[in-house]
């Protein structure tokens, strides 16, 4: 084990000379001047990390940082045995209930596996198996705690695929006398920390700042040490859903699809599940893809154009459904309809089908393929393949819209019958 550790420290010392290092700190303005938490996604490498708003992000291209090769003692996580041969157990404390993500990286920073669970408060145990010989970095993250630990595997031959399996919870267990392999751990509400993230010159970062109900996306290709200032803007619909926002050129857009079931004045929008009834409507309605409510969590609702055009307004106060011209302003800023789609589509996701041609999400628009609902028979189509969004402008019996596909980088401008069910994005007044 000492030989392995010394080897990687030598690698670190050699590569540090050529490393590009930037320090990124965070501030808020607008509706809030404080920053609670920050999610940083490297859209080039498809990696991510979560920080407290008071933390500093250290971008470095050395893979696992030197501080991550020197374990610190802590009582909240335990990995045993470590070094491992066939498998090991991972035991850690969830200090509050919530969604928790476990990610495992090799020494180059490549993600080996990932799993996510909704955990209760208490000590939780996972089983890790199938690791080839080497040094690995484990990251455990939630909104309220963050652990990192080094794992060493002495397996000479990997006889099966690497997998991590949830074992169970032991509420209230006392781990004070257990040895730890923690590299770094801190409460999300603790003092300032420096959080390392692997970075190569030219990588594009999607940085989401959160302050209370507000979330703002900031797109960055770092070239220097700097402070990222989030302009927090209220975007809350009549159901009290709070949306992330992003500035693209001179416009500010919602960075996710609309989920409201009410007009701005509190009047309910009918949820029409019957296909035949949907196709005959001349008034506002919404539905979920295949009438599955859970699809709304990711893709938002699908709305007919009559809901979009209703004078009671479907968008949050201070926001509106974009006109056909406002869509054109967006695509012109992103170098035209023949290229803008790639810069609008979310990448680093399996939600888009195939290779998701040309997707970079360079604008932060973060488009997902929510599909549509037919105006003829009410059948749902195209989830995973296409995303469709209404404009506020009609064209005879039709209305203008935009759609993106998995197979190209275009933004397609078209007009469709008002009875179709499409997604909605709002733009700030």
Image (cartoon, rainbow, N blue to C red):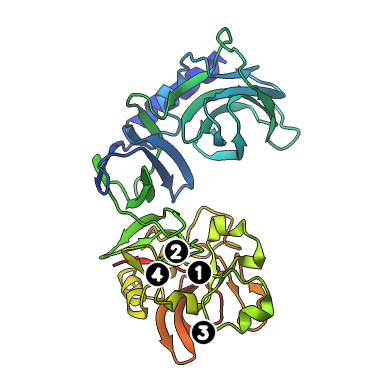
The earlier-in-sequence mark between 1 and 3 is 3
Q: Mark 4 and mark 3: span between their CA atoms?
A: 21 Å
Q: Are marks 4 and 3 in contact (CB under 8 Å)?
A: no
| Label 4 sits on residue | 340
Residue 155 placement (x, y as % from top left): 68, 25
Alpha carbon separation for disc pair 2 and 3: 28 Å
Q: Which residue has dot 3 on it?
A: 416
Q: Which residue is mark 1?
A: 423
In front of the other: 232 or 222: 232
Q: Is residue 363 above or below residue 325?
A: above
Q: Nearer the viewer, residue 45 or 19?
A: 45
For the residues labelled 2 and 1, the Cα–Cα distance comes to 20 Å
Q: Which mark is residue 266?
A: 2
Label 4: state its secondary structure.
helix
Along the viewing direction, whichever of 375 and 52 lies nearer the viewer? 375
Q: Quadrant of the C terminus?
A: bottom left
């Amino acid at each position: 084990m000492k030989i392995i550790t010394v080897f990687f420290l030598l690698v670190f010392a050699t590569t540090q000379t050529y490393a590009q290092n930037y320090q990124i700190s965070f501030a808020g303005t607008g509706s809030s001047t404080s920053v609670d938490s920050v999610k940083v996604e490297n859209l080039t490498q498809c990696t991510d990390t979560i920080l407290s708003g008071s933390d500093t992000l250290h971008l470095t291209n050395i893979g696992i940082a030197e501080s991550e090769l020197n374990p610190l003692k802590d009582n909240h996580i335990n990995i045993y045995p470590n070094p491992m041969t066939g498998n090991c157990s991972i035991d850690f404390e969830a200090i509050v209930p919530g969604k928790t993500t476990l990610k495992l990286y090799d020494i180059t920073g490549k993600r080996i596996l990932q799993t996510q669970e909704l955990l209760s408060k208490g000590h939780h145990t996972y089983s890790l198996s199938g690791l080839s010989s080497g040094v690995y970095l484990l990251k455990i993250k939630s909104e309220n705690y963050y652990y990192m630990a080094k794992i060493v595997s002495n397996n000479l031959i990997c006889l099966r695929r690497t997998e991590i399996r949830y074992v169970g919870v032991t509420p209230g267990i006392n781990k004070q006398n257990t040895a730890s392999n923690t590299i770094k751990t801190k409460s999300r509400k603790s003092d300032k920390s420096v959080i390392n993230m692997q970075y190569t010159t030219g990588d594009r970062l999607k940085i989401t700042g959160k302050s209370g109900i507000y979330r703002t996306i900031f797109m960055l290709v770092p070239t220097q040490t700097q402070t990222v200032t989030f302009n927090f803007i209220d975007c809350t619909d009549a159901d009290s859903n709070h949306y992330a926002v992003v500035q693209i050129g001179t416009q500010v857009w919602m960075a996710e699809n609309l989920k409201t079931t009410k007009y701005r004045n509190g009047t309910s929008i009918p949820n029409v599940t019957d296909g035949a009834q949907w196709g005959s409507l001349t008034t506002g309605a919404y539905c979920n893809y295949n009438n599955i409510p859970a699809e709304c969590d990711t893709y938002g609702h699908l709305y007919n154009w009559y809901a979009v055009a209703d004078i009671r307004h479907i968008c949050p106060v201070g926001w509106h459904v974009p006109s056909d011209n406002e869509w054109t302003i967006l695509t012109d800023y992103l170098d035209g309809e023949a290229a803008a789609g790639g810069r609008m589509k979310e990448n680093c996701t399996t939600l888009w089908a195939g290779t998701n041609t040309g997707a970079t999400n360079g604008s932060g628009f973060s488009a997902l393929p929510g599909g549509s609902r037919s105006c003829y028979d009410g059948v749902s189509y195209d989830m995973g393949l296409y995303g469709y969004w209404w404009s506020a402008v009609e064209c005879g019996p039709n209305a203008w819209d935009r759609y993106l596909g998995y197979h190209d980088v275009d933004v397609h401008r078209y007009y469709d019958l008002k009875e179709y069910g499409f997604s909605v994005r709002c733009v700030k007044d």
